[in-house]
Image: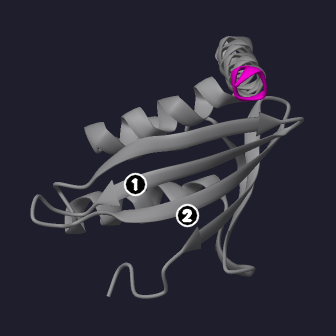
Amino acid sequence: MMFQMLKKFFFISVFTSLIACNSKSKSMNLDSNSILVKEMITAVNKKDAHQYVKNFSEDVQIYLDSELKLSGRNSLQHNRDEHFKKYPNVRSEIQHLVEIDNKVIMHDKVWLNPSDKGRDIVEIFSFEDSKIFKVEVIQSKDFFN
């Protein structure tokens, strides 16, 4: 009986410590690159391509499955303009956000239209001088088909 109580106490202590660490790391990210990524998602939900690209470097490179898909902020803005026209009801919601050094890793859920079940996307944003210079996108191959 005493062993079970100690075991429960141990698990509760570890769980509480993990929650406290998680809360601390989230508050530490308030003045970091994570905010810039959050602004980008706000721009997606507003369908504002100009706001979307404002935190990207002029020569940003976007990769999908390790293949270069877009190069340059102007190309990215044109791509987002076209995307918002094609999917006027698109919306995105951040599921997880982790910041490590100059990278922000985001797992978000994207709905292209109101009847869409939503799809998961993982993006790794690399920053230099407070600008995104590289994005690596992981998503299902049939996402936009």
Left or right: residue 68 compared with residue 91: right
Report x, y in % for residue 125: 71, 49
Outermost residue, left side: 115
Tell which residue pokes out farthest to the right in this image: 101
**Magenta region:** 1-5
63 and 55: which is toward the camera = 63
Dot 1: element: strand
Residue ID at (56%, 42%): 96
Look at the image and tell me in which quarter the N terminus lies: top right
- Judge whether residue 61 is colored magenta: no
Name the magenta segment's main secondary structure: helix
Is residue 2 magenta-colored?
yes
- The type of residue carrying mark 1 is Lys
Q: CA distance from mark 2 to mark 1?
A: 24 Å
Q: Nearer the viewer, mark 2 or mark 1?
A: 1
User: Looking at the picture, how far across and down is residue 12, in whole percent?
Assistant: 67, 21
Q: Position of residue 136 (x, y in %)?
A: 70, 64
Q: Quadrant of residue 89?
A: bottom left
Give the residue displayed 74% in from the left and 17% down from the top: 13
Q: Relative to 3, does residue 63 appear above or below in the rendering?
A: below
Of the numbered discs 2 and 1, the one sitting upstream in the chain is 2
Count of picture labels: 2
**Which of 33 and 129 lies nearest the eye of the viewer?**
33
Q: Position of residue 20 (x, y in %)?
A: 70, 13
User: Which residue in the structure is indicated by mark 1?
Assistant: 109
Q: Amino acid at mark 2?
A: Ser
Residue at label 2?
A: 75
- How was this image coloured? one colour
Around disc 2, counting alpha carbons within 10 Å, would you say few (fewer than 14), some (14 to 19), or many (20 or more)?
some
Q: Is residue 118 left or right of residue 61?
A: left
